Amino acid sequence: MINIKLNEFKVSSADLNHKNLLFFEFAEKIKPITNIKINSDKIILISQKDKNSLNLQEFIAITKDINENHSFFIENPHITKIFGYRINKNRIIFG
């Protein structure tokens, strides 16, 4: 399997509602994406307690100047690859 890259996500999410909230699923739990870290080739999605989930519009603004070949990962607590996302009740859920 190949993990999802920023350019693929931007193209596939272009027609989605920009108010949709972002989440990730790990160990059968859905957690809000509240922040991201960028390194040389990774976009790392982070969930912090007591913080609100980013929406798609905020995510696009944060990543607008990032290399589009960066791949998605989650930090929970270890760095784990993300292979895609799904839409559920106005939520974008990475997994």
Image (cartoon, rainbow, N blue to C red):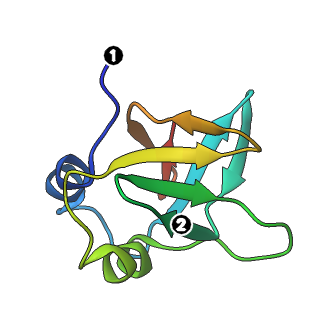
Q: Which residue is mark 2?
A: 37
Q: Which residue is mark 1?
A: 1
User: Which structural element holds mark 1?
Assistant: loop
Outermost residue toward the right in this view:
50
Residue 76: % across, % down: 73, 44
Please report whichever mark, 2 or 1, sits nearer to the chain's N-terminal start: 1
User: Which structural element holds mark 2?
Assistant: strand
Residue 6: % across, % down: 26, 54
For the residues marked 2 and 1, what is the alpha-carbon distance in whole angstroms?
23 Å
The residue mark sitting in front, 2 or 1, is: 2
Q: Residue at x 33, y 16 (%)?
A: 1
Residue 69: % across, % down: 20, 51
Instruction: Please determine whether, in this image, residue 16 is positioned above or below residue 73.
Output: below
Instruction: Please determine whether, in this image, residue 57 is positioned above or below residue 2.
Output: below
Q: Residue at x 50, y 44 (%)?
A: 73
Instruction: Please determine whether, in this image, residue 22 is positioned above or below residue 85.
Output: below
Outermost residue toward the top in this view:
1
Q: Could you say which is closer to the camera, residue 38 or residue 11?
A: 38
Q: What's under tag 1, amino acid-wise?
A: Met
Q: Residue at x 64, y 70 (%)?
A: 34
Residue 76 horizontal side relative to residue 13, left or right: right
